[in-house]
Amino acid sequence: MSVSEHSDRAHRTPAGGVALALIAPLLLLFTASFAVPVMMMLSRGVTDTELQQTWPRTAELLKHWNGQGRPDSALVRTLATEMLASHRTGTLSLVANRLNYDVAGSRSLIYSTAAHLESGATVRDLDDLAALDTRWREAAIWSTLRHAAGPTTSLYLLAALDRKLDSEDRIVSVPSEQSVFIRVFMRTLQISTVVTLLCIALGYPVAHALASLPAKYANLMLILVLLPFWTSTLVRTCAWVALLQTHGLVNNFLAALGFIEEPLKLLYNRAGVYIAMTHVLLPYFILPLYGVMKTLSPDTLRAASSLGAPPLTAFLNIYLPQTFPGVLAGAVIVFTLALGYYVTPALVGGGGDQMISASIAFYAHQSLNWGMAAALSLLLLLPLALIGLARQSLLRAAS
């Protein structure tokens, strides 16, 4: 190693150490307050610990049972013993709720059986258990118990894809009347894609104007672009409710100009969702694109024009490729934010316009099924990961 190389390395190493020391507190704060809680939440979508923690010996026996035929007497007696113990300690609801996620009616089965055991019923084998409730003879309940033995589970992820495991551990589709999540995911992707395309169509001319106008006019336009950030998303969405309603400002204005005779249905449908979400997310597309356009030199277009290229040809072959990284960055930001939108579709959309975030909120706050909420969130991360990979590929191809 030469003297100059050794000197360069000596100067670089302390600087790198100082930079790492400066960002270390931020990394620790990010890890402790965001990364770790999010990972713990998402892990609920693939873990299953309720039965294992409440009935540990039953869970161990279920893991060693292949699910074929009748459960043996030892398993049945252990289940009855731990069921009675958990009923007395007040932890029976953990298992009852978990089993009810898989098979409706399991909660009532568990509680009714526990009540019989509390009153002095004796259980030696499956026949004694079935005498308390005939549902214990059904293969579905024992299959559910075996699938809930933990510590990991595919229940929530399969349910988020409208699938489930049958009594023979085969993946099957849920009944058509219960199949909802695939449609909601497709609707979420469709709405996010359309909103992104609308933001590109509306935001590109605005960003170009901001980059081309003199500073005094461009600054005024930039303030107007940033103005929506001064109010919350909830306030902006409520404003659109007032504007888009049947006798709102938009319909009254169009009627006054003679464009319509009957009010348009712009609220509580897909059109209202597109309008409101595009308005809310448009600045997120304009700002990164404006930052890219501001760095471009107008001399390239002048050079193309001086060489005889028509304006449209110069734009398509010279200007647009240079702004492509900004378009891609803005589109990724808008699409990512749109995927997780909850307030705007809930307020201006109808029942057929709700996105997957509404389902996540329902399971997290109302039914308290954290496993299902985590599974839906995990699946929502999949298109984001694909978008990240596609963005890198497009940028490499463009360069």
Image: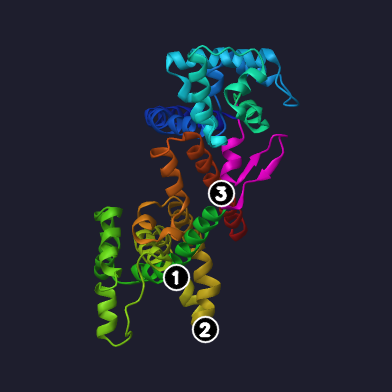
Label 2 Cα neighbours within 10 Å, binned few <14 / some 14-19 / many ≥20: few
Tell me if I can see residue 7 in this picture: no
Task: Residue 178: give its label.
Answer: 3
* First along the sequence among labels 1 and 3: 3
Left/right placement of residue 195 relative to residue 386 reads left
Figure quadrant of residue 172: top right
Q: CA distance from mark 1 to mark 3?
A: 38 Å
Left/right placement of residue 127 relative to residue 208 reads right
The image shows residue 283 at horizontal and vertical percentages of 35, 60
Label 3 Cα neighbours within 10 Å, binned few <14 / some 14-19 / many ≥20: few
* First along the sequence among labels 2 and 1: 1
Which segment is the magenta one?
Answer: 152-179
**Mark 1: amino acid:** Ala
Question: Can residue 283 be found in the magenta stretch?
Answer: no
The image shows residue 37 at horizontal and vertical percentages of 43, 30
Q: Which residue is mark 1?
A: 201
